[in-house]
Amino acid sequence: MKVAITGIYPESEDRIRGGVEAATLRLSQGLARRGDIDVHVVICNSGRAPGITNPEPNLTLHSIGGSKRFGNVLFSIPDRRRISSYLRKLKPDVVHAHSLDRFALGAIASRLPTVVTIHGIIEMESALETEFAHKLRGSMRNRLVHAALRKARNVILLSPYVAEHYAGDLRRANTWTIENPVADSFFAIDEPEERNTVLHAGLLIPRKGIDNLLQAARIARAEISDIKIRFAGGATIPDYKEEIDRTVSELGLEENVVFLGNLSPDALALEYGRCELMVMVSKQETLPVAIAECMAAGKPVIASPVGGIPYIVRENETGYLVPYGEPEHLAEKLVSLLSNRRMREKMGAAAKAYARERFTMESVCDRTVAVYREIAK
């Protein structure tokens, strides 16, 4: 079967920016390695040189260029046409578009059998942006989202949360729930843990609740003086990173906080192994790849009960759920879990078992191929 995947895709496996890039990379690799799927990734990005490459057997990358300016203002029409035209020439049996935007609309316009994976709820995320330009960009992208929702007939959802949010829009669509895949390497981490080390994996942006975690760290430090919070993820808003640095200084956390920046998958895997637990108390999420990766590594997670997180982080089983804006509560759970190795091991084992059931590349690819075969009939 010939499958075309279109969406954002990393230029290098060592530089993955965000969960969507990780998902498209891992899914493409997993499908290609089955041997029965000929995978073609169509990349529409103005910052990437056009060309065709074959990074591994059964996997071909097609970089087709993209609009350099005014994409949102023009409703991404030039890119949608570019994607649609290229797909028609490629003639795959199935197109798999990632995200409800130009990729989905371009794929649907090709009139080829198409399934769309929804990776995020744009209106929820853009509502939490603090800069006007980002809010405006989110508003324009949301127009694309609803245009794609009206046209999509086959949709993959990362969690039941997405189905609940878009229930009215998806009434005419066939839907399947399939999580993003986690690379096999995350299931095989055997790095020694470092005492009282907590990991936060994700971009340093306002909706991730960084301030809340720092306040909790200050409170928890009264009982665990050597607590370490390691932040793995880049800062995309310079002013916000400066605000975080000021907060760290004001709270006197310089010895307790480390900013690692963007990490390669191998370096990130080491961080999952090094930590005793992971924290992600965001204001809004859909289903973070980072949480799935951490669970695959066998570590408990403390996260906020937003979006699809409560479907995988189960209270008192694979971790704890603590709402954003409750630093005292978060500090209590941090101290409780860091002080109880037996509980950490129990939760970590439960997290790994769940991850093996739902997040392995083999499991995700098998379920995804079943969808392809159904819609290609």
Image (cartoon, rainbow, N blue to C red):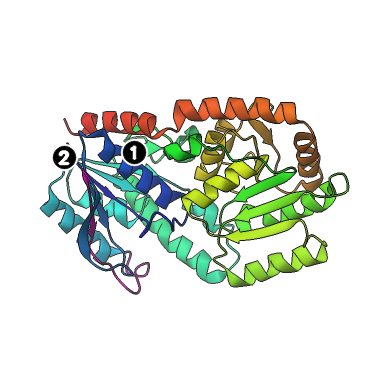
- Image vertical order of residue 104 relative to residue 115, above or below: below
Left/right placement of residue 58 relative to residue 104 reads: left
User: x, y (%) of residue 337?
Assistant: 75, 35
**Residue to which mark 2 is pinned:** 93
Question: Which is nearer the eye, 125 or 91?
Answer: 91
Stretch of the chain drawn in magenta: 57-75
Q: Amino acid at mark 1?
A: Val
Q: Tell me if residue 82 is in the magenta stretch.
A: no
For mark 1, give the secondary structure. Answer: strand
| Figure quadrant of residue 12 | bottom left
Cα distance in 3D space between marks 1 and 2: 17 Å
**Residue to which mark 1 is pinned:** 155
- Image vertical order of residue 245 relative to residue 96, above or below: below
| Figure quadrant of residue 231 | bottom right
Residue found at x 82% / y 45%: 328
Residue found at x 82% / y 61%: 251
Crowd band around label 1 with a 10 angstrom C-alpha radius: few (<14), some (14–19), many (20+): many
Q: Amino acid at mark 2?
A: Asp
User: x, y (%) of residue 139?
Assistant: 46, 61
- Image vertical order of residue 120 relative to residue 85, above or below: above
